[in-house]
Amino acid sequence: GEAGDHAAPQVRRPVATVGVVGTGTMASGIVQVFAQSGYDVVVVGRAQEKLDAVVTGIARSLERAIAKGRSDEATKQAVLGRITTATGREALAAADLVVEAIAEDLAIKAELFTDLDRICKPGAILATTTSSMPITELATVTGRPQDVIGMHFFNPAPVMKLVEVVTTEHTADHVDETVKALCAKTGKVAVSCGDRSGFIVNALLFPYLNDAVRLAESGVDLTAIDAAIKERAGFPMGPFELLDVVGNDVSLAIQQELHREFGEPGFKPAATLEAKVAAGELGRKTGRGFHTYA
Ligand code: CAA
């Protein structure tokens, strides 16, 4: 009944500097989100040329915004000025929040979280944007599982407003609350979610995407499926356009996890999805997926 019951989440742990680990599509979008919202961002990747490509990509995105009259050169310079890059993880020592957006591979992520535990300052929030790995397993490789949380952004991160905030049984309430407050500060809408396969959105979305691939395998033209869904179902993209945005490798990992967890025969990844990944046709990021891009 008190007004305070509905008070907006507060930042319980001060966050000024955000570390982002990774140089892929999600990492790049997340860097942009935080830098645009006034945070200093340290991006850590293995190769300087990939780090440079992240900064170039963000600069290009900001230039598109200027061309559309939605931004200006001073804003662009300010945003870029907040971004620093490093090939060594030690650069994360000063971060108040680290968001991991590296390969969807549990061993690789666990190795990173072991390092973050060693490097990051006490009280730093350690977030993962995984869409298919159990976050509890990442939390428990650290000596501070209370500080580990999921921040599941959607692609393209600068545009999509939803963030699934995924708590494990170990996550501290003030970490959960701080992350939700940060989502609001960056213009995102946080939805709470437990650490279950697919969280909320992917548990509903990926069986549909997998069925779309099966439908195409049965002989229906995939361009017709895309057109039908966009025209009739109110989705901004058809399933194959969306698979190409998400990346077929990421989609396959999610679909495999849902199949492993829930065991439903219908959740078995469609053969064509596996074949696309094997062929390196991952979607927009490789220029070819279900559709071909210039
Ligand atoms: N980075 C930054 N800005 C981008 C962008 C990007 N990658 N892509 C598009 N935008 C911006 C554009 O600049 C444009 O901004 P303004 O309107 O302010 O000028 C705006 O977004 C709209 O873009 P467009 O006009 O170019 O194109 P559109 O209207 O067709 O929208 C879209 C593009 C936003 C991607 C839209 O098609 C869409 O919402 N698609 C569905 C995306 C979706 O469902 N994503 C979730 C996938 S599931 C997932 O990610 C979870 C997982 O775990 C895998």
Image: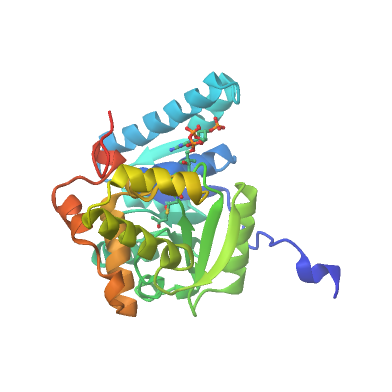
Residue at coordinates 36% horizontally, 44% vertically from top-left? Answer: 25
Q: Is residue 165 above or below residue 44?
A: below
In percent of width and height, residue 214 lies at: 26, 60
Which residue is rendered at x = 64% and y = 57% of the image? 181
Q: Quadrant of residue 68?
A: top right
- How is colour applied across the structure in the image? rainbow
Considering only vertical position in the picture, is 50 above or below 165?
above
Tell me if 82 is positioned left or right of 246 in this view. right
Residue 149 location, x and y as percent?
Answer: 48, 66
> Camera-side residue: 290 or 255?
290
Taking depth in this image into account, of 7 and 77 the one nearest to the observer is 7
Residue 205: image location, x then y, percent: 42, 61
Horizontal side of residue 142 vs 121, given as left or right: left
Residue 254 lies left or right of residue 155; in this view the side is left
On screen, 263 above or below 8?
Answer: below
Q: Where is residue 109, by image quadrant?
A: bottom left
Q: Residue at x 59, y 59 (%)?
A: 190
Q: Tally the marks.
A: 0
Residue 282 lies, in percent from the top left, at 24, 46
The residue depicted at 43 percent of the width and 37 percent of the height is 84
Quadrant holding the N terminus: bottom right
Q: Quadrant of the C terminus?
A: top left
Q: Residue furthest left?
A: 279
Name the one closer to the observer, 226 or 21: 226
Look at the image and tell me whether residue 74 can be seen: yes
What is the residue that sits farthest to the right in this orientation? 2
Residue 27 visible in this rendered orientation of the protein:
no
Q: Is residue 111 depicted above or below 17 in this figure?
A: below
